[in-house]
Image (tube, rainbow, N blue to C red):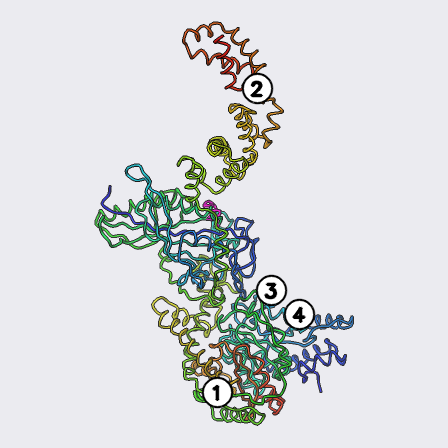
Amino acid sequence: MSLIELSAYQLTQQIKNKKSSCREIVDEFLERIDDVEERVKAFVTVLPEEARRRADLLDKRLQSGEDIGPLGGVPVAVKDLLCTRGLRTTCSSRMLENFVAPYDAHVVERLAADGAITIGKANMDEFAMGSSTENSAFFPTRNPWDLGRVPGGSSGGSTAAVAALEAPLALGSDTGGSIRQPAAYCGCVGMKPTYGLVSRYGLIAFASSLDQIGPVTNDVRDAALLLQTIAGHDRRDTTSINRPLPDYLSALTGDIKGLRVGVPREFFAQGVEGYVSDAVRKAIDKLCELGAEAVEVSMPTTEYALATYYIIAPSEASSNLARYDGVQYGLRRHEPGDDIIAMLSKTRAAGFGHEVQHRILIGTHALSSGFYDAYYSKAQKVRTLIRRDFEKAFEQCDVLATPTAPTVAFELGAKTDDPFAMKLADVCTIPVNMAGLPAISLPCGLHDGLPIGLQLIGNLLDESTILRAAHAYEQATEWHKQRAELTKK
Amino acid sequence: MTKYETVIGMEVHAELLTESKQFCGCANEPMAAPNTHVCPVCLGFPGSLPVLNGKSVDLSLRTVLAFGSKINTDCIFERKNYFYPDLPKAYQISQRLLPLGEGGFVEIEMPGEDGTTQLKRVGLHDVHMEEDTGKSQHGQELSDADSSLIDYNRSGVPLLEIVSSPDMRSVEEAESYMNTLRQMLLYLEVSDCKMEQGRLRFEASVSLRPHGQEEFGTRVEVKNLNSMKAVRDSLRAEIARQTQLLDSGATVTQQTMLWDEVSGTTQPMRSKEQAHDYRYFPEPDLVPLQIDEAWLARVRDSMPELPRVRRERFQSALGLSPYDAALLTTTRDIADYYEATLQSLDKADGAAKTVSNWVANELLGRLNAENKTVVESPVAPAQLGELVKLIGDGTISGKIAKEVFDAMFESGRDAKSIIEERGLTQMSDSGELEAICRRVIAANPKAVEDYKGGKEKSFGALVGGVMKETKGRANPALVNELLKKQLSQ
């Protein structure tokens, strides 16, 4: 078996048992990137020199008998909205095309501390706005299962890299489904932790109250492993939760006897394809076979989640993205004689793509005097109702099982002219962000050779339970062992 | 008297005396070399997040407690969005819906018609926390007249904004308000109130209405006020401008005016820079600020005595005149100096008054002449106390004491060493003085004759003679006694 086919966990064992060096592992993944990247286009920046240098350093430390950490020697693809000191951090935007971050994001520091090796910066929808990675200002990323299809988004570069075995681990960010939906499309495991579990310091913000960083992996154990590294309190993010962390790996007991699996009927409507519903229901049956019990629950406010999201997220984005004004860093466009307003307008018109401009306009309007109460304020109230719906549901169950996305991956260009249809791809994931809950997507079937995702939603800070359920399911099925062929169907 | 009543409200921005900035660890030193106290947070770099400075909350709480405002123990921060190059995030973190303090008042003193002092309460609308912006430097000072430089040292410096109700009815009231407020802030040690450095900034809103009319007139905001004088002059100019408009039958337009010190007029701000829609919304990067009873109690315990209370105590407990009490409580430092001096003495009778004279007349006089504050006094309170003690016990005469004080002020040395060195100890040895008195009487037969003939004045000449012989060191009371005794023989 080639090294690239191993999970991150297996790679760490390989290193621990001195069967491979960090350098060998990095070289194999870099070689894989050389082979397939032209087809997949998962990376904005590949970092061969940095990765090799770091691998050599780790090997030296290993030789001198040092412990190089729980992720020691494992390559990671990092979504290009996480700041990496001294390296380009673009958000896949012309605005930040040449922006070199002066500091590392908290999670990047955590990765380094635990011995991981950043192998590249993954492509994404510009400023994380989109569901297909087609909004990257540079190029779209392809779905490794069918190069004619999108990988999903916005963390499509991260999921495609993991699915194409260009990296065993990746970090994504999830504002409305941006980890889980592309994970489903690419047949990976993708997890959005509880809001506040992972520090957002150094994550270039899209919508601050919704953004959360999470792992993208090929199996559940790796997700637990990576989560252990990135989770935990950080003083630099006041929304970061200060509580002792559980040991996520030890949660993977395989035992889900008596686990109450809630099935919210509303998540099986709203344009969810029959083949998706069928696969997810089969997965729920599987969980029941393993000792869980299914409980029908109802979450009536779910249908308002999408509309609510499209007020709150753009509102926050309109403010978060206002700093890109051409003054200190990033793109600047101006002509002699321009005043500051002209410089601002030209810079922002040239630097932001269509979807980003669209959302800034929506958000600016929603926050405007005279509209605030009708839009933003109302949306916050609905958000509270959605949260309560989840609270009520979790009185009856321990996890919720739903589809991750209503369809399998769609063809490149199929929805670029219909932004609303594109946004429907997030209908099952958005409510989870509104409530700040943890959720994981894992493969649960194939339709026409394309992966289908099962979403397991947990109660606040109960990552352990969804990891345990997902792991038990994975142990009993073969879906996670299926690999993409990197061809066009 | 004009036919209009003036209505004035004031907005005051005070930079707080914290060591670090409002939301990051950079030093709060806006006057340092440009851009030497900056970091990703106060530069608004992508991915950076704010963390609230607890010390600035302490200082803000101290202020709202002093005003008697209602304290919102659960308050939130909001984003005030607008584009400006010296505002690096393109929003200012501020408070609006739930500010730290609401209501409260500042009590000002105005002279009444009958010569008495009238108290008036100026109500406060709210007191809220926010952050300062950077500083732009335009044009002429640079080689390129079209370019601007920005210094971000001030960006993120903690600000307290104190918004008054439109309760002032004259320029004099506005001045009294400013002075009282400034004195309070200095006493509370929340700001150094250096207007020339922009550490304390005033903005006024002015409107006129016919006497007896309840409805307010159209208000005009006046900005760019860098000194107390600028506030006074601009208010007068603006009142005159509005009076003229109303007298001529025209109306006042609601707008923002800038004070132009050179022309002595208020000029309308460019319309482009007016009428912002700030699109306030809750700052998602900061959790709500919760202030518990323990925190409040801690701040309450740290509250200094406020100027008016201290002044009244100086009158009632120490028996000072209203004038002296006011003078000695002008600043907290002067009052502290006075009380420290007093404490170094053993509460001798009359010490309060004596020390008051020394501080108010001699010390402050010399300090003012040299443009120094009491903190910079070369004579420490204990040193002045010793001087007063040496007068009290007869070691030196009051007249000699002034000479000693001058020497102390110039050298910073103790009274005792100066007295010893210069041999200034008072002569109270009657034997020695008797001989001198006899010599003086013998040398001045004319004066003796006149005195005996009923010319009391001539006695003074004899005393003067003795003083001249003793270089002023003779104990005056003893000299009087001895001379009278000898003359009656």
Amino acid type at image mark 1: Pro
Secondary structure, magenta segment, majority class: loop
| Label 3 environment density (alpha carbons within 10 Å; few <14, some 14–19, many ≥20) | some
Quick one: label 2, few (<14), some, or many (20+) residues within 10 Å?
many
Residue type at mark 2: give it. Answer: Met
Instruction: Kindly report the distance in space between the C-alpha atoms of the residues bearing marks 1 and 2.
Output: 107 Å
Q: Nearer the viewer, mark 1 or mark 2?
A: 2
Question: Compared to A285, does A361 lie above or below?
Answer: above
- The alpha-carbon separation of the residues under discs 4 and 1 comes to 38 Å
Placement of A18 over or under B437, stated as above or below: below
In front: mark 4 or mark 1? 4
Q: Residue B76 sits in which quadrant?
A: bottom left
For label 1, the residue is A406
Q: Residue at x 73, y 81 (%)?
A: A14
**Could you say which quadrant of the image residue A45 lies in?**
bottom right
Do the residues at discs 4 and 3 belong to one chain?
A: yes
Same chain for labels 3 and 2? Say yes or no: no
Tag 4 and tag 1, C-beta contact below 8 Å: no
Which residue carries the number 2 mark?
Answer: B427
Span highlighted in magenta in the image: B190-199
Please give the chain letter of the residue carrying mark 2: B
Q: Which residue is mark 3?
A: A103
**The quarter of the displayed image where residue A28 is located:** bottom right
Q: Say which chain tag 1 marks.
A: A
In the displayed structure, B295 sits above or below A403; it is above
Quote the CA–CA distance across marks 4 and 2. 81 Å
Residue annotated with mark 4: A113
Q: Position of residue A94 (x, y in %)?
A: 52, 69
